[in-house]
Image (cartoon, grey):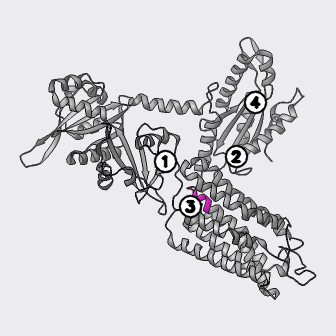
Amino acid sequence: MDLDVALSVLLIFSAACYLSMGMRLVLSKREVGTMPIGILFVVISVWVMGGAIELMSSSFAVFSIGRTGHFVGTALVPVIAYVCFREYTGSETPPRRLALLLIIPILSIVLAATNYYHETMWYPPFVDEAGQFLTRPERWGPWFLIVHLPYSYAVIGAAILTLFMHSSAVTRAQRRGLFLLIAACIGPLVTTAAYDLGFGPQTISYVPIAFAAMLPIYAWLILGEQIIEFTPLAYETVFQNMQDPVVVIDEQCRVIGLNHTAEAMLKVTETQALRAPLENLFGDDSPEVFLALNSGEPQKMMTSTGRFLHVQVSKIANKRASARGGQVLMFRDVSDVEKAQSEVRKSEKLLRTLIDHSVNGIVRLHWEMHDDGSRELKSIFANAAAGRFLGRSADDLVNKQAREIIDLATCGMERSDADDIFMHFERAAKAGASLDVEVRHRHKGASRWLRMICEPVGDDIAATFVDITDSKAKERQMESIATSDPLTGVLNRRGFERDAARRLTDSADDATGALLFIDLNDFKRVNDEFGHEIGDQLLTIASERLRKSLRSCDIIGRPGGDEFVALVPDVDAEVADKLATRLTSALEEPYIIGRKKLKCAASIGLALYPKNANTLTGLLREADQAMYRAKARSRGVTDVGGSELLERAM
């Protein structure tokens, strides 16, 4: 069989497989990412079929059809891959951005189809000396070299970079699928680059052949590894460090996430449990888990070690209609509470002693029957701690309706939130179930966090209030320590990148802003000549001048050493220039430290958003380069000052 015929048959078969797999994914719409991956395979099928037509063509008209199919693929695949990879990592591409991304690809397809008339994509000859059609011309046209080629590689590079940047936000057990997806892009990308750079034969378009070779790998990723069956689960570090075991399941009750505490409780790793049915982890010995799942109500269970766990189920809320749902099972150890209540039931005197001296607030509620057959909950006892927590004396809390107690506990919260908590309390009380919520209580300007645990005690309800204000404060303090510079008090590199990236991401499409990169020119000399203590004081003064010269809404950080950065959102070029000029003047002022009067001017680089860059990384790069240009002017020169210390990004 002739080689061209064999390759044509292979390409036609591969195109049919890509089309079949793509249409199946498009029509199923089962999972997140299914639609764009399906469309990607459909476009690849057009690309591969174009290669087959090129091989089989005997006339220039038929060959041109194949060429157009080739450019349909090479123009659209990068954009579709970008959308696909963003959706796979949990980010949607706005329709407006997608429309802008498609402008150049559509123009490239039109120009490729009509190249014979204007030759902007490639120049003749269209055949070689043997009369064979050239699938890769000897010379590319200006549109291909200047617009199409750089744009296509920039978009596909951004698509792959999207997967890399989100790898740290994916659960460890699911990163393998993400990295396999990245690796599967390398082969066709390298082949396309070799083709564009002029390597290989000119009469055979071997990029479609590369896609045909990759067909078994893509089929394995979709069917075997099921990379679109399980959307990567983004989570915060706190999820893994929670003291309470947490199990995350999908709609089919398959495990898609465990934290470390749950791994220890179940004696299984997250990787081993991934995709396993929940029944494999909790069998007949734990019916409370499935009762909580089916009813939606909290349950209490006892472990094999005699510990009591409070099982609470909550659904994963997702605003996107196409996104997967699921549920979160949280297990809270209430053994101490259960033990205390058991002892209380044995001795009423012991109950009074324990409750009266408890650091936790306790209110006992009793069902009061009315003549018409209705009943309501009223408090019959409250200890001193409950009075302190709720801003009343213990005696004042007695004979209060349950709604009044809840209102006192939620004092300072939004009315709708307070109503929601009471609704859950009332439902739990009527069902004889437990309730465990956290509320923020405000009284006379003071604020505290309370954990309210309501448990049935016989026919009554015991509401326990635990002050968790300190633990909440410690959480905030630990977060502040992790993201702040201990010397100057501004954000460190990690904190700045987090807050600045979040601000840019949340900004409107037409938002403007600026980024300042500041370097203290003579800091090393001051540090070497006067010592680190003087240097540290100078850095502290410089950071204070930054705060005074900029606005309270601006985000200031110290990446390290004598460098500072500041994101100035919602300003135009003129306002940004004024702020930078004012900052230059402020940092040029002498530093009075003890009896020393030191000069330490700063070189500042200014980059505008989105004019110079529309990402934090791009803004930092442009501002850094501008700062070094400003710094170069003052190197070895003593009379540089004022506007010469400020450089704007080009």
Q: Are the residues flagged by discs 3 and 2 in contact, CB closer than 8 Å?
A: no
Q: In the figure, 524 relative to 568: above or below?
A: above
- Give the amino acid type for the residue marked by disc 3 in the picture: Glu
Which residue corresponds to mark 3?
225
Query: Residue at 29% of width from left, 25% of height from top?
Result: 388
Query: Residue at 52% of width from left, 74% of height from top?
Result: 27
Residue 197, image x and y in percent?
84, 64
- Give the amino acid type for the residue marked by disc 2 in the picture: Thr
Residue 520 - label: none
Mark 2 or mark 1, which has the lower sequence index?
Answer: 1
Q: Picture quarter containing residue 363?
A: top left
Q: Is residue 223 left or right of residue 492?
A: left
Q: Judging from the image, what secondary structure is the residue with disc 1 in? A: helix
The magenta stretch is 84-93
**Where's the N terminus, which quadrant?**
bottom right
Which residue corresponds to mark 4?
585
Q: Classify 10 Å Cα crowding around label 2: few (below 14), some (14-19), many (20 and above).
A: few
Q: Judging from the image, what secondary structure is the residue with disc 2 in? A: helix
Q: Is residue 423 visible?
A: yes
Which residue corresponds to mark 1?
270
Which residue corresponds to mark 2?
617
Q: Are the residues flagged by discs 2 and 1 in contact, CB closer than 8 Å?
A: no
Q: How many marks?
A: 4
Mark 1 or mark 3, which has the lower sequence index?
Answer: 3
